[in-house]
Image: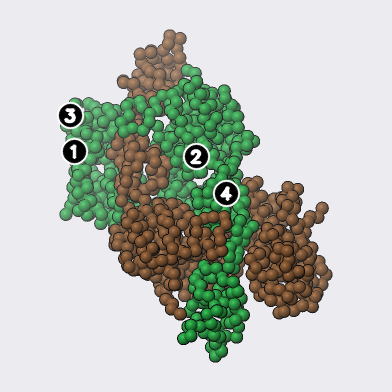
Chain colours: A brown, B green
Amino acid sequence: MKHDYLMNTPLAEARELLFSAAAAAGFSAGAETVGAAEASGRITAEAVFARISAPHYNASAMDGIAVAAARTFGAGESTPVYLTGDDYVVVDTGDPMPAGTDAVVMIEDVYEDENGGVRLLAAVSPWQNVRQVGEDLCMGDMIAPCGTKITPALCGAFLAGGVTRLAVKKRPVFGIIPTGDEIVKPTQSPAPGEIIEFNSVIFSAMLREWGAEPVVFDIVKDNKELLSRAVRQAAESCDAVLVLAGSSAGRDDYTSAVCAELGRVLLHGAAIKPGKPVVLGMLGEKPLIGLPGYPVSAMIVTEEFVKPLIARFYGGEEDGGQTVPAVLTKKIVSSLKYEEFVRVTLGTVGGVCYAVPLPRGAGVITSVTKAGGVLRIPQNLEGIEAGETVGVRLLQSRQSLAHTLVITGSHDPLIDLLADEINRRALGFTVVSSHVGSMGAIRAVAAGQAHMGACHLLDETTGEYNTSYVKKYFPQGGAVLRKGVGRVQGLMAAPGNPLNIRGIADLLRCRYVNRQRGAGTRVLLDYLLKTDHISPADIEGYGNEKFTHTAVAASVAAGNADAGMGIFSAAKIYGLDFIPLYHEEYDFLVNEAYADDPKVRAFFDILESEAFRRRLTEMGGYSFER
Amino acid sequence: MKHDYLMNTPLAEARELLFSAAAAAGFSAGAETVGAAEASGRITAEAVFARISAPHYNASAMDGIAVAAARTFGAGESTPVYLTGDDYVVVDTGDPMPAGTDAVVMIEDVYEDENGGVRLLAAVSPWQNVRQVGEDLCMGDMIAPCGTKITPALCGAFLAGGVTRLAVKKRPVFGIIPTGDEIVKPTQSPAPGEIIEFNSVIFSAMLREWGAEPVVFDIVKDNKELLSRAVRQAAESCDAVLVLAGSSAGRDDYTSAVCAELGRVLLHGAAIKPGKPVVLGMLGEKPLIGLPGYPVSAMIVTEEFVKPLIARFYGGEEDGGQTVPAVLTKKIVSSLKYEEFVRVTLGTVGGVCYAVPLPRGAGVITSVTKAGGVLRIPQNLEGIEAGETVGVRLLQSRQSLAHTLVITGSHDPLIDLLADEINRRALGFTVVSSHVGSMGAIRAVAAGQAHMGACHLLDETTGEYNTSYVKKYFPQGGAVLRKGVGRVQGLMAAPGNPLNIRGIADLLRCRYVNRQRGAGTRVLLDYLLKTDHISPADIEGYGNEKFTHTAVAASVAAGNADAGMGIFSAAKIYGLDFIPLYHEEYDFLVNEAYADDPKVRAFFDILESEAFRRRLTEMGGYSFER
């Protein structure tokens, strides 16, 4: 079938293509006049000079009496100087100096006389305790040069200098055109085939942060003529155009063709991942950027092309943000074909920052929302080994990075609930968790990469949970097992259990959805299969792996599978039938070095609190030891 | 005369007093509901859970054909599988999977048959190239816990999860009451004794940056009853009250008394400089902060008390910002009585960041607007020596800090104009200049603390400018003298020259305003006095020192002095008479190591450009060598 291929231009070259074309077309900020009180956050379009001095009159700098300094000369402890009411004027801080005076005696140094005069025991010199005209700012002085980001203090300085209005650089207006037959406005209940249009919300907010003004146009169907009309309209009224989705080379992708028709395409396809299917073009003097429809791809493209384009519009370079060193916990394989942007969670354990790679799919927006940073892997690298120290661009504050409780291992919603409770109580730290399965918990704690791990590992020989694993993997000690909760594992089936699933043997006659290798739930399944002498090879869907309980439930609820194993609360959320199979112990393995860490203690205080147990009880399927 | 004294409570103790009183009174954020599209920048008030999965249906992840995977099993290069039109459905990326299909064959791998069917040379496995329900986000998953700062990507994730509205923390409303008899609304031409009220503009902008909502009340005169009424009104309608000015213990300072009357005063006076006269109190459950009237004091108090109070309102701690190490260029003497906050300029020379202290006056707002950072000197330190490395809290971006051209020395407006030109041309660096006089230029260049210095130093024996100084201070080389501009120095006098000042001898019969020790202009005066056999002691006002040409001009224009020496352009701005005395050479001393630095070269390219010379010619008093 017909198929177009994309270019694979290296990122630096692609950026240069866009920026130089935009610069050549005069893509830069004009000026507009705003009130000084509204100018904070804007950028000066020309140098701002003081129109008046500040202070603009000689002002008393103290509460006291204004005098002619010469009248006080010679005053001392043994040679007081007496002044009558005609010789001085009482002044407050900020008062203008009365005619004939050039100094202020502080009120503490003024001794009132019986006759209404005053006595001074020390002289003052001319202009002492006086803020002379221009002490802060002189008329004609440059308060700020062109291109200065205006701070709140600068707003004050402008007004102090008599500048009530000033020229600031105009914000670039970006027209945003969402496209796609399947795209609908945000709703709580989209129909199958309808995709909620949220990219325009993301990019509008990003543009505002970067100093641009977004204008979102109506959603355009996948139709070349309609898109052409919308792009023409946006190019007329805006400084630049973003087309959301349709930037690839598929049947319904028209961005490139429309750009070629109305202007010229600079590039179609860059060597980045995610973000490869990008369109860069010029519509006359207006830049056009065609973004992929997948939100993560689109965000990378926006960061790499749109953010610096805005900075250049203002005549600067984009702020590259902060980069911190972090130890990679897991090997990342990368293609030599692309420069890759991998989202990672960041957590600090024992003073070392660890980066855990998140799912790399272009559609997984939660890989951005859960990320603490982004790791950039150059095009010429095949990957990065676990244990290597890498530079990670921060997406969170450096301060928050230092105060993390890192929990790695098996997934249970209670970890998220606990993170929520910790935030509610404002304990000064946040929970960073990674779902890498129960065996991952043991590895992370052993490597010192987590304060604690969550696990529910069944010893097939003893039927006991967790303890034998700790003995095996921590023969010399180094980790403490702390009781968590009991929970019921079982099989989830469609409502009403149409296939009448009663136990493990029934999996032989249905489509199963499994958990990933290393997950405690998978270990449990394998144990139960073995007990029943069933071979995994005989289970249809054994290789269909999901990473969380809710993902299994969602799969069953959607009819993608007939049964899956998981905890009761996940089945409950999805209204599924639940066939209890096994009572297991979901415990926490704490790195001994952090057993008394206040963060760890706070975690268990909450876990063991009545209020939190009530919250778990409401979810169902949990039990607690006394 | 009657005078109240302030307390001198250490900063940490003062903060704790305020924060614990506010916490005890329940000063914390409630919740309000906003649309997800408008939520960026806000903070979640409770955990947000996905209401629907994303994708919420099985979606094709590719352009291609949807098939039942089982129909493709066994396909290979030599064993193609043929499908008829009934066996597949053409799908685009994002399309829902048709009933009976569970995999997508990419379009590149589909070979069209003559009969309308297709041929496949490879099998696909179940769910290959399909985004299954919940692949990104599963219904019931926590998207963000309570207390999460909402990013643009999170807005998208909320919408993807079917969350169109959510609970965010309410912003605290701060009532701002400007006070003072002399305070007027911003104007370009205030009368003597009128002070432009700009503090409310500064603090409104700061509060907005920190996530609070400012409400500015009308200016209140210095009157206890009026202030009491305004504070009561603000406390009723706002979450907290800021009173601007009146926080000291002077005659017209009522903040403390009003706070005591309406609630209770926690503290009046903290051991910080600037910022000592602060009032902290509670009006019932609402915090009150009385700020000093001087803008710099008030900004320090706001940073130290209000910013963290807002952070605690939200249940967190304030972001302490970034601190960088910098070498102090000049000794700072500090009082053991106070914790001091010294504003500094920051410039990087040869990879080392240097901090130059700015004027420390509480009223000098330009000491904040010109500052690149703030140096905190603990209460128990008497000061810091020049050359010590200190931690400076950044007020600018770390990135901008690395790209600075540091020019130290004599003041001439052309330096500011050049900085403006450099910004206009967006050359990727900024100019950081300090006015420390011509001798300061030599010291800074010799110490490697500046790329270049500006000087106009007259050799009294030869009448030559600058060259002999370079020989004397750089006997081994290390600095290159580059020609700058010629300029005319002269005496400035009131318009019409009422005292008929004609030359240096006339200074004996008028009040003079001088430049600071080390300034080239002062060296010139001393030379001319010596030539005329006049003793400085006989000049009234010889000790009245100003730091810039415009400051001298402002002083003469205000009638604070009858004459001062300076350059023509300063006299012109103030409409003063100008009596030319001497043609001098204002040159640049370039550290040899940076003679070919692109920043230095760009500086001279602009200085020597026709356009820039025209700008100087318009100002008047400059001449140029060919």
Q: Is residue A340 visible?
A: no
Using the image, tell me which numbered label, if any, was put on residue B166.
Answer: 4
Of residues B456 and A312, the one nearer the viewer is A312
Nearer mark to the viewer, of 2 and 1: 2
Of residues A218 and A421, the one nearer the viewer is A218
Q: Residues within 10 Å of mark 2 (few under 14, many from 20)?
A: many
Which three-letter amino acid code belongs to the residue tagged 2? Answer: Glu
Which three-letter amino acid code belongs to the residue tagged 4? Answer: Leu
Chain of the residue under label 3: B
Alpha carbon of mark 2 to alpha carbon of mark 4: how far? 20 Å
Q: Which residue is mark 1?
A: B581
Q: Earlier in the sequence, mark 3 or mark 4?
A: 4
Q: Is residue A294 visible?
A: yes
Q: Is residue A505 above or below residue A197?
A: below
Q: Which residue is mark 3?
A: B496
Using the image, tell me which numbered label, if any, was put on residue A136.
Answer: none
Marks 3/4 in contact by CB < 8 Å: the verdict is: no
Q: Position of residue B353 (x, y in %)?
A: 43, 53
Alpha carbon of mark 3 to alpha carbon of mark 4: how far? 70 Å
Q: Earlier in the sequence, mark 1 or mark 4?
A: 4
Using the image, tell me which numbered label, if any, was put on residue B213.
Answer: 2
Marks 2/1 in contact by CB < 8 Å: the verdict is: no
Name the residue located 25 percent from the left edge and 53 percent from the top edge.
Answer: B607
Marks 3/1 in contact by CB < 8 Å: the verdict is: no
Q: Residues within 10 Å of mark 3 (few under 14, many from 20)?
A: few
Look at the numbered disc 1 and give the secondary structure of its residue.
Answer: strand
Indicate the quadrant where residue A154 lies: top left
